[in-house]
């Protein structure tokens, strides 16, 4: 019996090795299957092929399609070219950005231009400015500006500068060619188109006719109206001036004294120190 002991241990070793091999193989097979990357499902989404500005009418050469993961598709996206062709853009879209429904005018609007982006009950009004008045050309569509006017009050020689419109939305900024005052040479004039209500339109027209207009750009988050008294030559020169010292006068006390001279009695007021 003793001579079979080594054989038995060898057989047991072989069996243990086989079982271990099978278990290891199954574990490695399951891990390999788990590590295998499953193909992700995608969907072609419309993006802008070039920079598109507001008021443009979309055409096929402005759009291209790129794959997006279906699980991460943005809301309001487009997957068909036919649903975009002829739509009017109301907010600028940069190249390679997706085209969203929120960036487009209603399907009932088929013509582009300024009229497509005017808010209800608003008006678009163009104002001619120079590079200085137009904040050196830094005013662009979507900016917010205040409108200042400098003019002379009736019957007064001292001009006054006053903010007449605040937080006005800029619809467009561009240039147009005009003849100079002598009608000979052509000059480029900056034109800023502002979105105003009817009352603001009247103020803007009056300011442009009676005085000189200046635009002041403001922060997008600054929507608070500021009440001002306007600036005149006097208030301008008083800026950063030393306050004048007021003279103080000390009131002296006075006393009333009765004087008796014989039968005459009179009152006399005597000033004190």
Image (cartoon, rainbow, N blue to C red):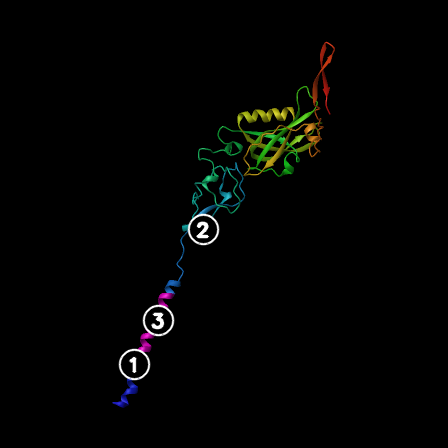
Measure how far apart labels 2 and 1 are at the Cα level.
Answer: 58 Å
Tell me which corner region of the image, top left, top right, bottom left or bottom right, holds residue 36: bottom left
Quick one: SS at disc 2? strand
Tell which of 64 and 2 is nearer to you: 2
In the rendered view, tell whether residue 51 sits above or below residue 196: below
Measure how far apart labels 3 and 1 are at the Cα level.
Answer: 20 Å
Residue 102, position as x, y percentages in the image:
46, 39
> Quick one: label 3 or label 1, which is nearer the N terminus?
1
Q: Which residue matches tag 3?
A: 25
Q: Is residue 144 left or right of residue 237?
A: left
Quick one: SS at disc 1? helix
Q: Residues within 10 Å of mark 3 (few under 14, many from 20)?
A: few
In the rendered view, tell whether residue 150 sits above or below residue 262: below
Residue at image position (29%, 86%) is: 7
Measure how far apart labels 3 and 2 are at the Cα level.
Answer: 39 Å
Q: Is residue 173 left or right of residue 16?
A: right
Tell me which corner region of the image, top left, top right, bottom left or bottom right, holds residue 268: top right
> Quick one: label 2 or label 1, which is nearer the N terminus?
1
Q: Which residue matches tag 2?
A: 67
Specify start and end residues of the magenta stretch as a single range. Answer: 12-31
Quick one: SS at disc 3? helix
Residue at image position (32%, 76%) is: 18
């Amino acid at each position: 019996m003793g001579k079979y002991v080594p054989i038995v241990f060898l057989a047991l070793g072989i069996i243990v090795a086989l079982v271990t091999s099978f278990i290891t193989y199954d574990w490695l097979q399951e891990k390999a299957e788990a590590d295998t990357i499953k193909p992700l499902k995608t969907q072609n989404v419309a993006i802008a092929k070039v920079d598109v500005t507001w008021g443009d009418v979309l055409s096929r050469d402005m759009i291209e399609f790129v794959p997006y993961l279906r699980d991460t598709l943005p809301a309001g996206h487009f997957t068909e070219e036919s649903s975009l062709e002829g739509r009017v853009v109301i907010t600028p879209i940069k190249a390679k950005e997706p085209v969203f429904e929120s960036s487009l005018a209603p399907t009932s609007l088929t013509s582009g231009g300024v009229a497509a982006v005017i808010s209800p009950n608003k008006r678009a009004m163009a104002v001619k400015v120079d590079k200085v008045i137009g904040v050196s050309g830094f005013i662009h569509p979507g900016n917010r500006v205040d409108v200042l006017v400098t003019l002379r009050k009736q019957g007064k020689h001292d001009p006054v500068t006053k903010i007449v419109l605040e937080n006005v939305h800029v619809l467009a900024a561009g240039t147009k060619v005009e003849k100079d005052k002598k009608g000979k040479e052509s000059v480029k004039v900056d034109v800023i188109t502002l979105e105003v209500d009817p009352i603001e339109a009247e103020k803007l027209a009056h300011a442009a006719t009676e005085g000189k207009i200046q635009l002041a750009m403001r922060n997008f988050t600054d929507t608070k109206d500021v009440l001002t008294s306007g600036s005149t030559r006097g208030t301008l020169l008083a800026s950063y001036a030393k306050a004048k010292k007021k003279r103080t006068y000390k009131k002296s006390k006075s006393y009333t004294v009765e004087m008796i001279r014989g039968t005459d009695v009179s009152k006399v007021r005597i000033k004190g120190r």
